[in-house]
Amino acid sequence: RKDTMAVMLPELHRTCHLLKQPLLFMDRPAAMFLLVDGLRESSAAAAFCAQRFHTFFLPRLSSRQDEPEDFELVEMVNQAIEDLEKSLLDSNARYAGCGLALLLVLGQRVLVANVGNCRAVMCTPPKA
């Protein structure tokens, strides 16, 4: 059984274009990495959140007519997580629980967020 799930969208512009939610204003590179860790020896909530987080976050991001400020990005992530939590509580996976860590790369900016007991470490390769 797998309690931890990862969602990697290394080409966020292409992914959003295919989902008909283009990021016309966003700097490149743009990527989203999501790590979801299930609780109580169950992967139900982790699978639920891993499969649905982008449906709450990407529409907010693509609806912008200009590049969002840092505080606006943080607010978008917070709103997406709150809406995801409400959706999880209405689902059959509500008793399983999970934590998540998010890494969002937008041009030269990096946003890292976590909820619960889920951590991620970002490293750069050593210089030769």
Image (tube, rainbow, N blue to C red):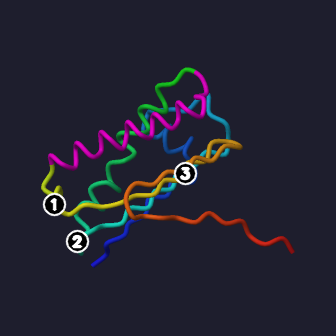
Residue appearing at x 67%, y 66% in the figure: 123
Farthest-out residue, top: 65
Farthest-out residue, right: 128
Relative to 21, say whether 94 is above or below: below
Quadrant location of residue 109?
top right
Secondary structure predominantly adopted by residues drawn in magenta: helix
Label 1, label 2: how far apart the Cα atoms are: 9 Å
Do labels 1 and 2 touch, CB within 8 Å? yes
Per the image, the residue denoted by label 1 is 95
Provide residue 26's location: percent of width, then percent of height. 62, 33
Quadrant location of residue 124?
bottom right
Q: Amino acid at mark 1?
A: Tyr
* Neighbour tally class for label 3: few under 14, some 14-19, many 20 plus, Cα within 10 Å: some
> Which residues lie in the magenta part?
66-90
Label 1, label 3: how far apart the Cα atoms are: 26 Å
Q: As rendered, which of 40 and 54 lies closer to the eye?
A: 40
Asked if residue 112 lies in the magenta stretch, the reply is: no
* Residue 11 appears left or right of 108: left
Residue appearing at x 53%, y 35% in the figure: 73
Asked if residue 78 lies in the magenta stretch, the reply is: yes
Label of residue 112 in the image: 3
Residue appearing at x 58%, y 28% in the figure: 68
Relative to 70, say whether 1 is above or below: below
Q: Quadrant of the N terminus?
A: bottom left
Q: Quadrant of the C terminus?
A: bottom right
Quadrant location of residue 77?
top left
Element under disc 3: strand
Label 3, label 2: how far apart the Cα atoms are: 25 Å
Per the image, the residue denoted by label 2 is 40
Farthest-out residue, bottom: 1
* Neighbour tally class for label 1: few under 14, some 14-19, many 20 plus, Cα within 10 Å: some
Q: Amino acid at mark 2?
A: Arg
